[in-house]
Amino acid sequence: MDGGGATDTPAPAGRGRTLAAGTELTGATREAICTMTYRRGDRLVMSLGQEVTSPDGVSLAAGTPVLVEIARVDSLTGEVQFRLRGLQLQGEFIPADGSVRVTTSSVTERQVSTGGSDKGKVITGAIIGGIMGRVMGGGARGAVIGAAGGAAAGTVMAARARTTERCLAAGATLTATLSSPVSLPPAP
């Protein structure tokens, strides 16, 4: 007989803190993501835009850093594909896998040189043209004509060495979807 007192029963085992597969983590990038600056494998951080709470009550605070990786960059279309790599919680990196899509962003374009300065190409062309005109026996007049032709050739070379860079604006909204559950450390 226990005399009406409480019985000693073991406490239920603590439930793990887990974010379920399919949980979406939405946040903004901190910097612009440009097709000529970023390459496959580069990593960047987005910050959760709002608190995320899983069905079992696990929550991540707004501002939680989420690490994403560049999976593919298409410099022609400006398309950038990402994959989820993890998140930081209580100073600890938690690996995570999942897909990432760009939810909202503006795309900007700008012309950039792919090698050397444009001015340098024009000047180099003029110098080489001037030397060639003089060497070919044209004297001063040949040098001037050669320099003009060389400058024109340098201008064409500079124009051909330009390409269009496309950038997702800083603050682009990304949504990562967990492909498998993520176990989190115990709450402090």
Image (cartoon, grey):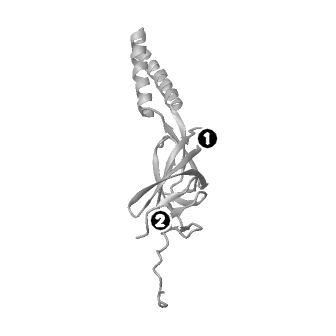
Residue at the spot 47% in from the left edge and 63% down from the top edge = 64
Residue farthest to the bottom?
3
* Residue 43 showing in the rendered view: yes
- The amino acid type found where label 2 is placed reads Gly
Q: Nearer the viewer, residue 163 or 155?
A: 163
Q: Secondary structure at mark 2?
A: loop
- Looking at the rendering, which quadrant does residue 177 occupy? bottom right
- The amino acid type found where label 1 is placed reads Thr
Q: Nearer the viewer, residue 63 or 177?
A: 177
Residue at the spot 52% in from the left edge and 42% down from the top edge = 35
- Left or right of 3 on screen, residue 54: right
How far across and down, in percent of the image, does residue 129 sit? 43, 19
Q: Which mark is residue 22?
A: none
Q: Nearer the viewer, residue 166 or 74?
A: 74
Q: Which mark is residue 77?
A: 1
Disc 1 + disc 2, Cβ < 8 Å: no
How far across and down, in percent of the image, does residue 53 sit? 56, 68
Q: Nearer the viewer, residue 140 or 38?
A: 38
> Badge 2 is on which residue?
63
How far across and down, in percent of the image, does residue 12 sit? 50, 72
Mark nearer the N terminus (1 vs 2): 2
Graded by Cα atoms within 10 Å as few (under 14), some (14 to 19) or many (20 or more), the crowding at tag 1 reads few
How far across and down, in percent of the image, does residue 1 sit? 48, 87
Residue at the spot 47% in from the left edge and 34% down from the top edge = 114
For residue 65, above or below residue 167? below
* Residue 34 showing in the rendered view: no
Comparing labels 1 and 2, the label whose residue is closer to the camera = 2
- Left or right of 157 on screen, residue 79: right
